Amino acid sequence: QVQLVESGGGLEQPGGSLRLSCAASGLTLDAYAIGWFRQAPGKEREGVSCVSMGDGSTYYADSVKGRFTASRDNAKNTVYLHMNSLKPEDTAVYYCATLPAALVELCGPDWVRDWGQGTQVTVSS
């Protein structure tokens, strides 16, 4: 059974930083990408960043390029999302998810196989 456990959300001021973690178990990760998705109230869920666990190729949404960085630790089956220069519009529930590695550049919720439970990120002064 696939399990994805997110951690690291919370309240941060604009301009601050947070790091999210996603620990995966129950599958062979080399064939998959791990994606970070977010959903703000009243908005559709969107892809933020996806990283291939095999070759490390990475996708970022335009809204987070230059501010967010995804990294992976294959030994720990864990993916991180380092979020810097946070903005109020980054406020959302953040989910990690698995999707086929070949679709890492699409990084859309339609391709997700498994979802984590989500963690709240709030950016506010």
Image: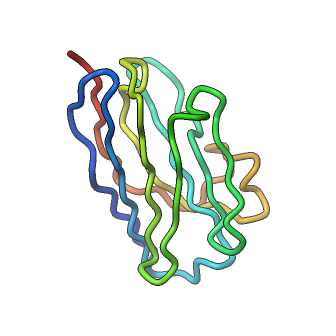
Residue 66: name its quadrant: top right
Residue sitting farthest toward the right: 102
Is residue 4 depicted above or below 10 in this figure? below
Q: Is residue 120 above or below residue 85?
A: below
Q: Which corner quadrant of the image does residue 14 belong to?
A: top left
Count of numbered circles on the image: 0
**Where is residue 44 shown, x and y percent of the image?**
53, 26
Residue drawn at 63 percent across, 63 percent down: 33
Residue situated in front as seen by the camera: 29 or 68: 68
Q: Name the side, left or right, on which 87 lies relative to 121.
A: right
Q: Looking at the image, which residue is at 70% across and 64% down?
A: 100
Question: Is 42 rendered above or below residue 105?
Answer: above
Give coordinates of residue 19: x percent, y percent. Answer: 34, 49
Give the vertical position of 32 relative to 81 (above or below).
below
Question: 19 left or right of 124?
Answer: right
Q: x and y percent of residue 106 in the render? A: 75, 46
Which quadrant: the N terminus? bottom left
Give the position of the C terminus as an image quadrant. Answer: top left
Q: Residue placed at 62% from the left, 58% from the top?
A: 51
Q: Position of residue 115 (x, y in %)?
A: 47, 56
Q: Is residue 45 left or right of residue 18?
A: right
Is the image coloured rainbow, by chain, by secondary structure, or in one colour?
rainbow
Q: Name which residue lies at 65% across and 70% down.
A: 32
